[in-house]
Amino acid sequence: MTDTLVVNVKMNNVTAKWQEDEVTAELPFNFTAEQLMSIINEVIVDVLAGQTPAEIEVINELDGLVVLDEASESVIPVMFADDNDAHFIEALTMNGIGGQLERKNGHALTTGTPVIQVLRLKNNMADVYADAAMYRTVTAYLRSMLTGQNVVTEEEAKLTGLFDQEINKWDTQALALTDLTIIQLPEIGNVVAHDLTNHVLVEKISTLPSVKVR
């Protein structure tokens, strides 16, 4: 039997699979990052039932944006694509900026692209935007919460609309458009398996497994 615990994060639920056992928990409507992390912890603890895996692999399928304040707490539930944001893409396309961002990122802008969601906050929810200190994709957030690594791969960065693949850095044009600073975003680099650091899980597991989030 495998020594790897596999956690699948989907839009409606989280499933943890360990050897012959499987535990699934539903996600509530309009959930926060903290609620998501709590449910992940719960299914991991439940499925292990006191056992210890050698590895934990988290497979995230949520294309969402986590927005945190200076205390690393959510200022808004996890943001997802909203068709009402299509007008931002239309405006960026008309003034040419959209095409420039798409060429630098290598991906088309959609209402699920984080740069568009940041524009939603900036233009429609100024109070929330003012409180926002950090922006993380769901994958990046889970990686930081489970391993302490505040990092995204270049491929993950390309999907944000905030990246310049020619120089492999956050894009100054996109930052100016959203009024974000580099320190509000994760580092860009290599993602490797790392020892579990989440204090809730560390207290429940006798030895530290390595964790990989993708």
Image (tube, helix red, strand yellow):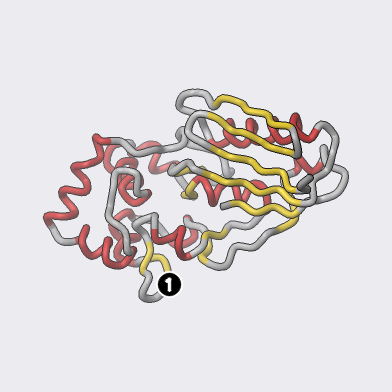
Mark 1 residue element? loop
Q: Which sits in the foreground, 104 or 23?
A: 23
**Residue at point 34%, 67% (across, down):** 172
Judge the density around disc 1: few (<14), some (14-19), many (≥20) Cα neighbours within 10 Å. some
Residue 34 coordinates in the image, percent (x, y):
59, 34
User: Dot 1 corresponds to which residue?
Assistant: 168
- Location of residue 63 by image quarter: top left
Q: Quadrant of the N terminus?
A: top right
Residue 114 coordinates in the image, percent (x, y):
37, 49
**Residue at point 64%, 41% (across, down):** 7
Q: Which sits in the foreground, 174 or 166?
A: 166
Residue 176 coordinates in the image, percent (x, y):
31, 61
**Residue at point 51%, 36% (across, down):** 10
In the image, 168: left or right of 122?
A: right
* Placement of 175 over or under 60, stated as above or below: below
In the image, 123: left or right of 131?
A: left
Residue 53 coordinates in the image, percent (x, y):
79, 46
Q: Residue furthest left?
A: 94
In the image, 90: left or right of 146?
A: left
